[in-house]
Image (cartoon, helix red, strand yellow):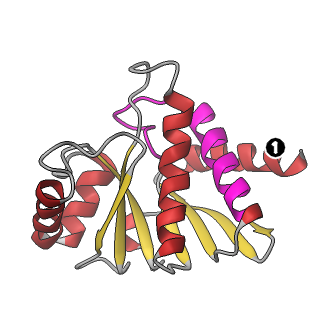
Amino acid sequence: MKVKINDNTLALMVGDITEQETEAIVNAANGLLQGGGGVDGAIHRAAGKDLLEECQKIRQAELKGEELPTGEVIITAGYNLPANFVIHTVGPVWNENPDMEEDLLANCYRNALLLAKVRNIKSISFPSISTGVYRYPIDQASEIALETIVNFLGENEFGDVVITLFEQEDYEVYEAALKNLMEQ
């Protein structure tokens, strides 16, 4: 599914985010920036060891050894990925901060888009942040993600945004949410 928002494009697809040829892909990282399971592990494996080394340097220099806070972003090179850049963000864990989960998840998408815009990146691919091991319900997460992206694209000249979903079932949830949002 693909929609136009101003002169921007928002597309949904089923695929492997590590194979996306957008200028940047977004990594649903953990706060340690060490790689891990799911999307994070797949991106680290596909990018190669240089990605981990750059993440470790950023963690020491910019984050003073602390974890990347939930909803915040950093950017690295893409190394062996087709994408030139990886924007890393930490999504919220379901039921860890119930009063803040929606805002934290929206911040993941908003902050990644803002950083991409500042860096003059015109195409970006997102996974479904926090819906894997962090257990955020995908029906709620898809609404938050899409509303945040649609609002951003409605207010900014950006380019192309792709949400790359790993499974057809996830695609169908996002497709229904996007259709509903576009009808409002």
| Label 1 residue SS | helix
Vertically, is 24 above or below 175?
below
The residue drawn where x is 33% and y is 52% is 39
In the shown orientation, is residue 39 left or right of residue 113? left
Q: Quadrant of the N terminus?
A: bottom right
Vertically, is 137 above or below 123?
above
Q: Is residue 175 magenta?
A: no
The residue drawn where x is 56% and y is 50% is 168
Q: Quadrant of the C terminus?
A: top right
Give residue 96's position: percent from left, percent from top. 38, 20
In the shown orientation, is residue 142 left or right of residue 73? right
Which image quadrant is residue 16 in? bottom left
In the shown orientation, is residue 158 left or right of residue 91? right
The residue drawn where x is 49% and y is 37% is 104
Task: Please state which of residues 24 and 39 is positioned toward the viewer in this rendering.
Answer: 24
In the shown orientation, is residue 179 left or right of residue 53? right
Number of residues whose C-alpha sits closer than 10 Å to that of mark 1, classed few (under 14), some (14–19) or many (20 or more): few
Q: Is residue 142 magenta?
A: yes
Give residue 122's position: percent from left, percent from top. 56, 79
Q: Look at mark 1 in the image and give the residue it sits on.
A: 180
Which image quadrant is residue 42 in? bottom left
Residue type of the residue flagged with mark 1:
Asn
Dominant secondary-structure state across the stretch colored magenta: helix
Give residue 162's position: percent from left, percent from top. 58, 66
Whether residue 128 appears in this view of the structure is: no
Which segment did they paint magenta? 128-153
Residue farthest to the right, as pictured = 183
Give residue 71's position: percent from left, percent from top. 43, 43
